[in-house]
Image (cartoon, helix red, strand yellow):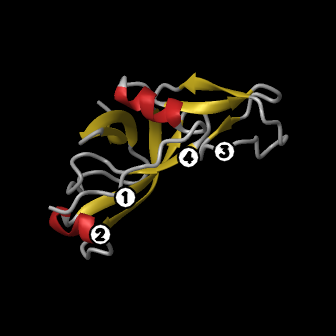
Amino acid sequence: MTDLIRPVVTDNNRGFWEGAAAGELRVQRCLACDHLRYPLAPWCPVCLDERWEWQALSGRGTVLSKLVFHQSYHPAWKDRLPYNVVLVQLEEGPRMISNVLPLTGEDFAVGDAVEVAFDPEGEVTIPRFRVAG
């Protein structure tokens, strides 16, 4: 199996990856306007302030969109076919693109409640989701 592409850890995303390794889903919270931001960025997309802190989220959300890949568009995923990709609306507001475990699973639907599940992938832990309940 080809290794997956690994994230480049920076000052802007280090807390996200450290949180995932510790079993906590974290996003940036703007200190000026309280906007929770994901994707992570060096400044707030709402007020442009550069000050932020890490905010832990519940990890609960709803599947807004789903698709299942049956063709590999990158060699790292060739041995994992088929696999799902979802857009999750998190309870606290941000939306996250991820997967529902098991990766090959299709036994879930748009509108299903999900909760974060931390999936070790070598030296990094990936926040993925599982159907709640």
The amino acid type of the residue labelled 2 equals Phe
Q: Is residue 10 left or right of residue 4?
A: right
Q: Is residue 95 left or right of residue 29?
A: left
Q: Which residue is mark 3?
A: 41
Mark sitting on residue 18? none
Could you tell which of marks 3 and 1 lies nearer the N-terminus? Answer: 3
Measured Cα–Cα span from mark 1 to mark 4: 13 Å
Q: Which residue is mark 4?
A: 95
Give the class, few, some or many, for how many residues have Cα within 10 Å of label 1's Cα (few <14, many ≥20): some
Give the class, few, some or many, for how many residues have Cα within 10 Å of label 3's Cα (few <14, many ≥20): some
Q: Which residue is mark 2?
A: 69
* Position in image of residue 62 (x %, y %): 46, 42
* Position in image of residue 77 (x %, y %): 25, 65
Asked whether disc 2 touches disc 1, contact meaning CB atoms under 8 Å apart, the reply is yes
Q: Is residue 29 above or below residue 108?
A: above
Instruction: Identify the image quadrant of residue 22.
Output: top left
Q: Is residue 15 above or below residue 76?
A: above
Could you tell which of marks 3 and 4 lies nearer the N-terminus? Answer: 3
The amino acid type of the residue labelled 3 equals Ala
Q: Secondary structure at mark 4?
A: strand
Could you tell which of marks 2 and 1 lies nearer the N-terminus? Answer: 2
Could you tell which of marks 1 and 4 lies nearer the N-terminus? Answer: 1
Task: Give the number of marks.
Answer: 4
The amino acid type of the residue labelled 4 equals Arg
Give the class, few, some or many, for how many residues have Cα within 10 Å of label 4's Cα (few <14, many ≥20): some
Residue drawn at x 52%, y 29% is 15
Mark sitting on residue 85? 1
Could you tell which of marks 2 and 4 lies nearer the N-terminus? Answer: 2
